[in-house]
Amino acid sequence: AFAPRLSFFFNAHNNLFEEIAKFRAARRMWARLIKDRFNAKDPLSMKLRFHTQTAGSTLTAQQPINNSVRVTIQALAAILGGTQSLHTNSWDEAIALPKEESVLLALRTQQILAEESGTADVIDPLGGSWFVENLTCELEAEALSIMEKIENIGGVLKALEAGFVQREIHRSAYETQKALESNKQIIVGVNRYAIEEISTPPPFRVREEVFREQEKRLEDIHKRRSGEAARRTLEELEKAARGNENLLPRIYGCVEALCTIGEISDRLKVVFGAYRDPGFL
């Protein structure tokens, strides 16, 4: 009843065929898992609905305009891999919040792919390619191996508490950095074809007036709200957090009483503390 409403969020990176195979493998794994393990009957349950965002970690501050090419490749991989929703990063996001003109280019990238390229008109256009099919099978096997390790630990929660997930992320990041520093992995403009840049585009800067406006809004909220109601709902939230109650209705009550995000999170921090990565404890 609820599986058709589930959706997922993926990143798209630079290796075109590997990314296409990754999305194809995910779709196949989901269909099999839902059908074979959970005995779903509705075909909609077996369809992997997913959103894709181009990978911010691939953007470079060096020769940043090159990022628009990377984003295009990543968006193309997501489309060919079957994504239903797409976010394209702006080329200057490695430097600061994007400027309006770079945001427009990111949007136009999607629109050109959608309305000029024809790539969105075909379902699974690379299906049947020996290379893509073989790579899909390889990635699926590797992903299933990691899932089996997590199952053996006792599930995702146990794996998080044991620091397994965090260690795997750190290991992957370390291996990537080593590959970059040894030139085994090439980033154009960083470890190959680097140039001494004469000038870089000025980064986006938030105007000082925006900070003042937000401060004024917070002052107005504090004056307008009932201090007693805000205090009471925050106390009720803290009390609920100390037990087993669903916190969402309590958080909603705090929002209705015009409590700020900072006030709500501070109360939860009193009970739960601040998150500490088990990998660094």
Image: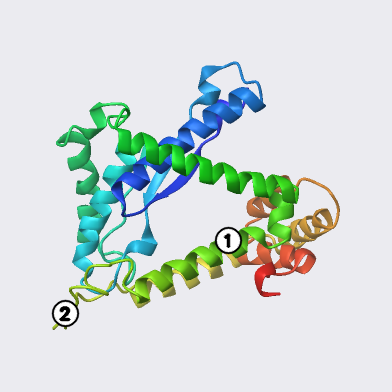
x, y (%) of residue 265?
67, 63
Q: How many C-alpha atoms fall within 10 Å of the one at disc 1: few (<14), some, or many (≥20)? A: few
Give 163 or 66, whichever is nearer the viewer.
Answer: 163
Q: Is residue 22 left or right of residue 31?
A: left
Q: Secondary structure at mark 1?
A: helix
x, y (%) of residue 66?
20, 64
Q: Residue at x 52, y 46 (%)?
A: 142
Q: Residue at x 37, y 56 (%)?
A: 55
Quadrant of the drawing holding the C terminus: bottom right
Residue type highlighted by circle 1: Glu
**What residue occupies the far top of the structure in this picture?**
41
Q: Residue at x 22, y 76 (%)?
A: 202
Q: Secondary structure at mark 2?
A: loop
Q: Residue at x 53, y 45 (%)?
A: 143
Circle 1 or circle 2, nearest the eye: 1
Quadrant of residue 118 in the image?
Answer: top left
Quadrant of the drawing holding the N terminus: top right
Give 155 or 269, whichever is nearer the viewer.
Answer: 155
Q: Is residue 191 left or right of residue 11?
A: left
Give 67 or 29, whichever is nearer the viewer.
Answer: 29
x, y (%) of residue 71?
27, 54
Q: Which residue is mark 2?
A: 195
Q: CA distance from mark 1 to mark 2?
A: 34 Å
Q: Is residue 253 left or right of residue 74?
A: right
Quadrant of residue 115 in the image?
Answer: top left
Mark 1 vs mark 2: which is more N-terminal? 1
Q: Which residue is mark 1?
A: 168
